[in-house]
Image (cartoon, rainbow, N blue to C red):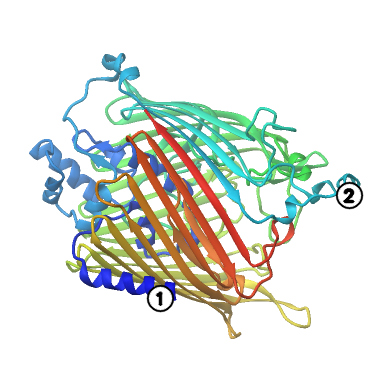
Amino acid sequence: MWIKRLGLCLLICISSWKGYSQTDWTEWNEQLGIDESSVDWQALYEELGEVAEQPFNINTITKDQLERLPFLSDQLIESILYHVYKYGPLQSENELWGIEGMSWKVRKLLLHFIEIGPAAQKPLWEWKHDLWKYNQQELITRVDIPFQQKAGYAAYPQEVMDKSPNKRYQGSACYTNLRYRFHYRDQVYAGLTAEKDAGEPFFSQYNRKGYDSYTGYLFLRKIGRVESLVLGHYRACFGYGLVMNTGGFFFNQWVNILSATRAGQGLNKYSSVGEAGYLQGVGMTYRLSKRWLLTGFCSSGKQDGRVEEGFIRSFKTDGYHRLQSDLEKKHTISNQLVGGHLCYNGKYIEGGLTAVYNVFNKMLNPVSHPYNLYDPRGKEFASIGGHYKWFFGRWILAGETAVDRTGKIATLNMLTYSPTVNTTFLLMNRYYDKAFQGMYAQAFSENSSVRNETGCYIGLETSFLKDISFSGHVDFFHFPYRRFQVDALHTSGIAGGGQISYSPTHSLTMLIKYNYSNKAKNNGNEEGERQVIPFIRQRIQGQLRYSPSEQLRVKTVLEYVRSGFWKQMPAKGWLAGNMVQWSPAGRPLQVSVSGAWFQADTYDARVYLYEPHVLYAYALSSFYGKGMRYSALLKYTWKNRWVLQARYAWTHYFNRDKIGSGLEEIQGSNKSELVLQLRWKW
């Protein structure tokens, strides 16, 4: 009964209040015409989160800084820079309306990442005393507390543990991390991150120094001819990801149409809590002249992996060290890497060369299966590639071609056409040899690696009417050789989707999106025979967002999923959810509450729900079975220095008496946790 009353109250609010919305940038990805579940958003979310906490000065902003915002097109970036150059410094946020192609949606997103500051800044070392006086620092700690015991934390007699040491996790069920950040303008960054996963010991056993993982960095920018200098843990991304990409805006199975031709950001600090996907050492970018940049970087570190008979059989990247079997894989591999990048940034053409060489301390030799015969094998690996970007009128031609030490090739080429600032057509073609060995390659693909694939991608993003925007894409792909769970040669597929958004007022947005994928997959019948047939997944989602005032936001989500093998009975799933965010005027408090009902026949028909989370944490939860989900997030700010956030989440299943499997199994139909985060800024 109380649920019905709450829904009635929300309906009355929606129908009676009028005003303007306060768009939350953390939900930007939900407004893309893609299936969010196909992308790991955590790295991008943390990158944008740091910019939102330390916004750019719009009056001194650079092209490099604007390119870090993926919702800006190349044409709009040029319009912003030209407006500031021609008309002088902005005095208020309202002047953003004068920029050609600036829509109200983009403006609201942009306001989260910029501020109106002075028009000029002195060089860094003329402000060396201010470095310690006017810097910004923060210390953040977080702890996750589960309320149901999992099988991996059950108590067993010592004789049982002696016989089966991997039957129980070594540490407590709580997760915790600690972050320290130092920041001065956009030129000096330093930080330290420590993390302990659930199940790992804390100040005991093999973690007597406290946390299980520590990372740190010192990152300097724009100091004389030194464009960037990084020490410690860092990311490197050059070109379009075919040679070197350990981070950036390039993801498997996703391309942002507006920024598809935007090359990698080069060297950048690594501030995430993840325990893989970074380099460890030193890197520097030096400006040779106005348009030429030279980068050199090196890395040396340990990696987790399974080593048998002196061979590296597989890499372990989940970062967990909570079982005896995990410890046996910890830091078993040494990896040394050296690389360089030379690039030219002209007015109408950009380009560069990237080269990388790395060597392991042991031979990489995975156990052979029919699907991995062409996977990388050896001790030393090297690749070199060239990327280009050519502007001619409203057209952009861009791409990259790479070759490894065995002569195998990977190439990715794109053509975009933008008749207006808010409309972009994209055509992208790719060819990745089945035996290409790009150990640090990460680019657009349907595979999890850059090899054994050809494809053609067509996309469009436009705001063809004042209140309506549309984005759509279709990707045709072909795999010459076998893949995991696909025991056939020369399989093909198609994936695509579209979204249409309607905003009759600034306070109301309605959108609907559809995603479709058709890929070959093994299917076993009752006789035990295995066939390779198309596996089809369809997903349709509708959203309604309404902000009756600056203090209140309401979002309603409906989702329906169908998935299954061709000409067989599909599994189905649906979800209906609502989210309310309230920020009382004049008070340092923000409350977010969300709830959803879901039902999904199988894991393949699972449904997804985005939920607000604490700072630097991204929550896209998946559900299958039949049940309901509730979460609440409370944020309290004291004197603009202390920020306390508390998040409680609870899931209840109607048709299950246990949740999860193996050591993660929970006996019962409920799963809940409390997340606490404390932030101190000074």
Image coordinates for residue 472, horizontal then vertical, percent? 35, 68
- Taking 304 as reference, is 106 left or right? left
Taking the spot 71% from the left edge, 38% from the top edge, the residue there is: 330
Q: Residue at x 22, y 52 (%)?
A: 107
Determine whether 384 is above or below 414 in the image.
above
Separation (CA) of disc 2 from disc 1: 51 Å
Point out the residue furthest to the left here.
87
The image quadrant of residue 481 is bottom right
Instruction: Name the residue tied to disc 2.
Output: 160
Task: Provide residue 22's location: percent of width, then percent of height.
Answer: 26, 55
Q: Secondary structure at mark 1?
A: helix
Which residue corresponds to mark 1? Answer: 4
Tell me the element at label 2. Answer: helix
Task: Give the amino acid at mark 2.
Answer: Val
Residue 671 spot, x, y in % from top left = 60, 61
Q: Residue 618: horizontal and vertical position, in percent? A: 47, 51
> Which mark, residue 238?
none
